């Protein structure tokens, strides 16, 4: 695999920056805080995202927040890599609410996400077919600055990946996947001591049913005993009633009829209460639903709806702001297009040059004409003076001198007049030129450049450009203000979103607690609960009326209070006593069987649960046996494969240090170094900081070639604590490795480049 292009739209300190990488060794140089570690993390993020491993739901790592740009509207980039002759482009948006990954065939532009494995936790396809995870990536091919990850779980995954790759059976065995599925299976079943696990729940239910079975057996035994007594009492009552048939006096019959009416009332009330009791038992599930709780649920829902309204308002504001910003950007584009191919700075420079030339020409013309006129005037005056002096005889007695003075004076006067005439003529001509706005060639060139005709049109054009630039700056300021407002709206929206989600979760939790799907169903249950209370009130009223009627009947009196059985039925007390006993026994039987299942049904359920528990035990035993076999296979594979790895890493370490050459790797992938003097084992952490860096470099170099030989080898300041000799040897290894795979080396030291040049190594340098 070769990474070809890194295009960072917004990541950490980088914005709209593209970096081209080459096959072989790429030396990325940058001073401290130039962004080397940020660029290394960007590569990791493009391949794996920023998700915490070993989670059952999508959880973001600390690096997500660390490298989020200050302007949180964009957090994205793209990466192009070549693998097996195919160019693949990854486009990833890191933003939490919009995170996405699109995988393209860079040659055709076709989306090929479905050609890669899908991860159901992060709900994205994985852009690598190598099976490499973030943990293995950061423990092998990606060396961070002075960071040695000895976390046992991470090293276990590196170990498992190495053993799977070394498996010589010809059968692909995914140790991690099998072990994880077996552990998940065990976790699903759980332990008997876990009340909420499947086996724990089954055991708890079985134990509860065994207790209920004892209660049911005792209750139904008592019911059978009571039923036998009821049958005997009913037979005895029939004999007593037969003995009392002879009592047929009119008064007795009349009173008996009155009692029969009471019995009918009692029978009617009992039937009604039996019906009400059945309804009450069936509707007992609606007990506890109150209108007060209903109002609370409605209040929670209203709060969520209010937050939704606020979110909708903010979302509309954000949309309006985006549209406004778009309109501003369009206006800015229009303003910029008014400049055509020119820039404001260029126009200003040309305008100032035009004015400067114009002022200088006028100044020179004016200065030259005045000087000529002054000189001509002085010459004329001097000539006239000489002529005058010669005429009045002031030059002396010599006639020759006077003639010479006269001749020279006349010549000077004539020359002065000619010069003055020329100066006046030149002045008039230049004034005419200025009047006609004649320009020098450089000014003509400036006017032609902007397709203008004269200086006034240039003045008008420049004023228009200045005004256009001020309006453009005003639009830019307005756009920046809208971006700030949009950022605040976004932050407010996210706060409201989290608040609303918390409220909805609370509402859903309460609805689940009351076993309803929505508030409407809870309201319906409240109404049924109120009807249940009304039925209970009616039931209790009937009970009180029954008590009064039974007191009348059992007391052997009519409604008028007259005794019935005192004369007519000598054994009335026995009948009443038997009737009371039968009623008591029937009531006791009803109470005993209420809410208790049949013992036979309970026994069948217990048998089913016993079978289920036994099956769970067998599954756990099978999982444990399989895990033991996997552990043994891994241990054997480690014994078989680790000698070669020890040899390779030892050779690398000896090449770098020229001292240590023996390396041992235990089953947890921890490194031990053989002391060449005494032959003792030393943990890597017992060595000096520089040597420990070299041990870990050798480990990553060696195991990285085994596990991730297709991935680029990425190193961030790996040689900070190396001496020059060991650094040179390490760079030799990297230069050799660069012939087989891509190397990306980050450094802030120019020494690496000097050493590479001295070694004659090929490399591609990138300055940050």
Image (spheres, helix red, strand yellow):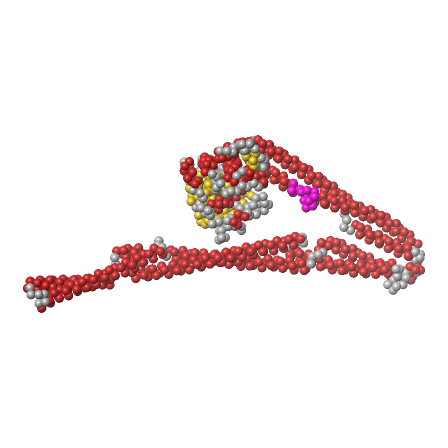
Residue 198 is a magenta residue: yes
Q: Visible in this render: residue 29?
A: yes
Residue 165, image quadrant:
top right
Residue 580, image quadrant:
bottom right
Q: Which residues are magenta?
A: 186-200
Q: Residue furthest left?
A: 399
Q: Is residue 682 above or below residue 572?
A: above
> Is residue 131 or residue 551 the one in the foreground?
131
Residue 639 is a magenta residue: no
> In the image, residue 195 lies at what x, y percent?
69, 45
Is 297 on the left or on the right of 242, as rendered? left
Q: Is residue 69 above or below residue 1?
A: below
Residue in the image at 72% along x and 56% along y = 287
> Is residue 576 or residue 79 the one in the foreground?
79
Count of all numbered marks drawn on residues in the image: 0
Is 258 on the left or on the right of 741, as rendered? right
Residue in the image at 56% along x and 56% along y = 496
> In the image, residue 318 lies at what x, y percent?
50, 57
> In the image, residue 252 lies at what x, y percent?
91, 60
């Amino acid at each position: 695999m070769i990474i070809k292009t890194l295009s960072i739209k917004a990541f950490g300190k980088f914005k709209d920056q593209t970096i081209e990488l080459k096959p072989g060794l790429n030396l990325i140089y940058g001073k401290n805080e130039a962004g080397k570690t940020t660029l290394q993390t960007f590569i990791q993020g493009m391949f794996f995202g920023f998700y915490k491993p070993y989670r059952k739901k999508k959880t973001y790592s600390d690096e997500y927040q660390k490298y989020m740009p200050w302007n949180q509207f964009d957090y994205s980039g793209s990466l192009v890599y070549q693998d097996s002759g195919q160019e693949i482009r990854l486009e990833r948006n890191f933003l939490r609410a919009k995170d996405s990954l699109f995988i393209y065939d860079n040659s055709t532009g076709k989306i090929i996400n479905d050609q890669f494995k899908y991860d159901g936790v992060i709900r994205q396809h994985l852009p690598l077919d190598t099976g490499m995870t973030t943990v293995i990536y950061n423990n092998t091919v990606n060396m961070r600055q002075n960071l040695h990850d000895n976390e046992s779980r991470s090293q276990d995954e590196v170990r498992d990946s190495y053993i799977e790759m070394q498996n010589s059976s010809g059968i692909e065995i995914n140790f991690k996947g099998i072990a994880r599925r077996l552990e998940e299976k065990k976790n699903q079943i759980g332990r008997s001591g876990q009340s909420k696990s499947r086996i724990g729940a089954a055991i708890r239910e079985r134990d509860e049913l065994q207790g209920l079975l004892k209660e049911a057996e005792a209750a139904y035994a008592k019911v059978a005993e009571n039923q036998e007594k009821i049958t005997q009492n009913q037979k005895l009552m029939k004999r007593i009633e037969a003995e009392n048939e002879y009592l047929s006096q009119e008064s007795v019959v009349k009173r008996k009829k009155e009692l029969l009416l009471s019995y009918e009332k009692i029978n009617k009330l009992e039937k009604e209460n039996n019906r009400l009791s059945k309804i009450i038992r069936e509707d007992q599930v609606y007990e506890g639903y109150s209108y007060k709780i209903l109002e609370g649920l409605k209040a929670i829902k209203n709060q969520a709806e209010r937050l939704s309204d606020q979110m909708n308002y903010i979302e509309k504001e954000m949309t309006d702001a985006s549209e406004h910003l778009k309109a501003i950007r369009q206006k800015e584009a229009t303003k910029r297009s008014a400049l055509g191919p020119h820039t404001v700075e260029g126009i200003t420079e040309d305008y100032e040059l035009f004015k400067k030339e114009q002022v200088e020409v006028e100044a020179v013309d004016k200065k030259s004409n005045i000087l000529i006129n002054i000189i001509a005037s002085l010459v004329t005056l001097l000539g006239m003076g000489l002529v005058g002096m010669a005429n009045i005889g002031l030059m002396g007695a010599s006639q020759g001198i006077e003639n010479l003075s006269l001749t020279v004076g006349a010549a000077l006067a004539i020359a002065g007049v000619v010069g003055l005439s020329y100066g006046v003529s030149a002045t008039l001509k230049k004034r005419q030129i200025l009047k006609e706005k004649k320009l020098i060639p450089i000014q003509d060139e400036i006017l032609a450049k902007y397709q203008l005709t004269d200086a006034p049109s240039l003045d008008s054009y420049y004023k228009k450009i200045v005004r256009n630039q001020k309006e453009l700056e005003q639009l830019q300021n307005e756009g920046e203000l809208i971006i700030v407002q949009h950022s605040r709206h976004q932050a407010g929206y996210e706060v409201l979103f989290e608040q609303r989600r918390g409220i909805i979760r609370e509402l859903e939790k309460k609805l689940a607690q009351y076993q309803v799907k929505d508030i409407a169903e809870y309201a319906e249950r409240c109404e049924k609960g109120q009807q249940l209370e009304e039925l209970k009130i009616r039931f209790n009223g009937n009970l009180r009326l029954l008590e009064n009627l039974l007191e009348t009947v059992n007391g052997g009196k009519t409604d008028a209070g007259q005794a019935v059985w005192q004369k007519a039925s000598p054994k009335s007390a026995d009948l009443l006593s038997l009737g009371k006993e039968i009623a008591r026994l029937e009531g006791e039987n009803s109470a005993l069987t209420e809410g208790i299942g049949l013992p036979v049904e309970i026994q069948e359920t217990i048998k089913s649960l016993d079978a289920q528990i036994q099956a769970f035990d067998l599954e756990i035993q099978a999982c444990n046996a399989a895990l033991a076999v996997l552990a043994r296979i891994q241990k054997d594979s480690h014994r078989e494969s680790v000698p070669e790895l020890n040899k390779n890493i030892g050779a690398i370490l000896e090449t770098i240090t020229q001292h240590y050459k023996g390396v041992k790797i235990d089953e947890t992938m921890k490194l031990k170094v053989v002391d060449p003097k005494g032959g003792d084992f030393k943990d890597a952490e017992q060595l000096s900081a520089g040597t420990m860096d070299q041990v870990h470099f050798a480990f990553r170099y060696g195991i990285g070639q085994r596990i991730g030989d297709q991935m680029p080898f990425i190193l961030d300041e790996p040689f900070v604590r190396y001496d020059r000799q060991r650094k040179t040897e390490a760079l030799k290894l990297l230069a050799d490795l660069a012939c087989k795979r891509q190397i990306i080396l980050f450094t802030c030291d120019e020494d690496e480049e000097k050493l590479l040049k001295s070694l004659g190594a090929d490399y591609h340098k990138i300055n940050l």
